[in-house]
Amino acid sequence: MSAIHLQNLVKTFGNFTALKTMDLEIADGEFMALLGPSGCGKSTTMNMIAGMEEPTEGRILFGDRDMTGVPMGRRGVGFVFQNYAIFTHMTVRQNLAYGPRMHGKPKAEIDRRVGAIAELLQLTPLLDRRAGRLSVNILQRVAIGRSAIMEPAIFLLDEPLSNVDAAFRAVMRTELKHLQREFRQTMVYVTHDQLEAMTMADRIAVMDHGVLQQVGTPIEVYNNPANVFVAKFIGAPGMNLIPGRPAESDRGLVVDLGPLGVTPPLPDHLAAALRRSNATVLYGFRPEQAAIAEDGEGLTLPVTFVERIGARTIVHMGQGGSAVKAVFDNNLRVAVGEMMVLAPDAASVRIFDVATGKAVGGRHG
Ligand SMILES: Nc1ncnc2c1ncn2[C@@H]1O[C@H](COP(=O)(O)OP(=O)(O)OP(=O)(O)O)[C@@H](O)[C@H]1O
């Protein structure tokens, strides 16, 4: 039985539909990220799970219990928002102890829980400091601790790291994952940051414009995006997508990319799927999954920009409206204006139908 089951949820505000039929099952103990750009309906979904909003249509089940219409306070969920809610006149210890105290827990139990959660979130040295004097980073950590200390079976976090600085965010990604494993919680985590989703989540629900686009493990959504939106949104940089037409060659089916040349032959399953249609397609490959073609056979493009980011070099290429990026290590010597011949890794190539935006050829290995 799933811990949370969203059944055909719809949410409208007046005549605006923020969520168009969301159907999602979250397993017990699973870390599920709701990922998508601003305004895609992530928070609306989360607020309905928490009980802050009621769905216009559909049901929300926790286990086999229908929670639709049950007030927030009786759903037994922990909730952490982007903007931490902390009592600034209290110490960190008093903030952490607040929930268990309100629930009438015995002092020894409160002390034990405060000690454990402070240790987990590295707050032990700060326990007797007044919250009002602490940095935003630490306050968000206290806010997470204050919710986590209630040991909720379902823990909802809505962009909890968006106000903290980058270095601290990296630390917190590890700590939150650790926290979730420690307490074996079902965690639903809203973010627009694919790095957060990719590094922490067991599965990711990718959303756009109020529509669930794909649900899968981080590696599934990276390797096998269901459509063009997911292909572009996941990955940094996102997948290269070049318009072209399938064409027969003496070596098998290829894609004619116009001024960029002709691709290497497609793997059999893609060729078979494409032969059935005469569609215009997008030829997709990840910037990390292409090499410089030593034999000179591949997509030929002029270099327009070279970005050197520590260990990686991102080479931007472009011609006739097609922009392509490729990622190499930092040993690459290349200059703007040079022609580059790229050979995408055949097994990683993905094809999308231009008309529907959907991946062609089903799932890949
Ligand atoms: N109470 C409301 N009344 C009217 N429109 C709303 C309301 N709440 C949300 N919306 C609209 O619904 C859409 C989805 O909002 P939601 O907050 O769920 O998006 P989001 O994916 O969480 O984005 P963000 O990260 O920007 O919060 C947005 O267009 C938003 O303006």
Image: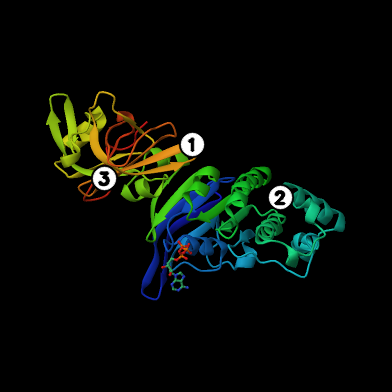
Q: Amino acid at mark 2?
A: Leu
Neighbor class of circle 2 (other Cα within 10 Å; few <14, some 14-19, many 20+) is some
Residue 67 in sight here:
yes
Q: Name the element at disc 3.
A: strand
Q: Amino acid at mark 3?
A: Gly
Q: Which residue is mark 3?
A: 318
Separation of marks 3 and 1 at Cα, in angstroms: 23 Å
**Mark 1 or 2 closer to N-term?**
2
Neighbor class of circle 3 (other Cα within 10 Å; few <14, some 14-19, many 20+) is some
Residue drawn where x is 80% and y is 63% of the image = 104
Q: Is mark 3 within 8 Å of ligand 1?
A: no
**Residue at far bottom of view:** 14
Q: Report the image quarter containing ligand 1.
A: bottom left
User: What is the x, y in percent for residue 209?
Assistant: 37, 61
User: What is the x, y in percent for residue 193?
Assistant: 49, 52
Residue drawn where x is 34% and y is 51% of the image = 229
Q: Name the element at disc 2.
A: loop
- Dot label at residue 121: 2
Find out whether the residues at labels 1 and 2 contact each other: C-beta distance under 8 Å. Answer: no
**Mark 3 or 1 closer to N-term?**
1
User: What is the x, y in percent for residue 45?
Assistant: 48, 61
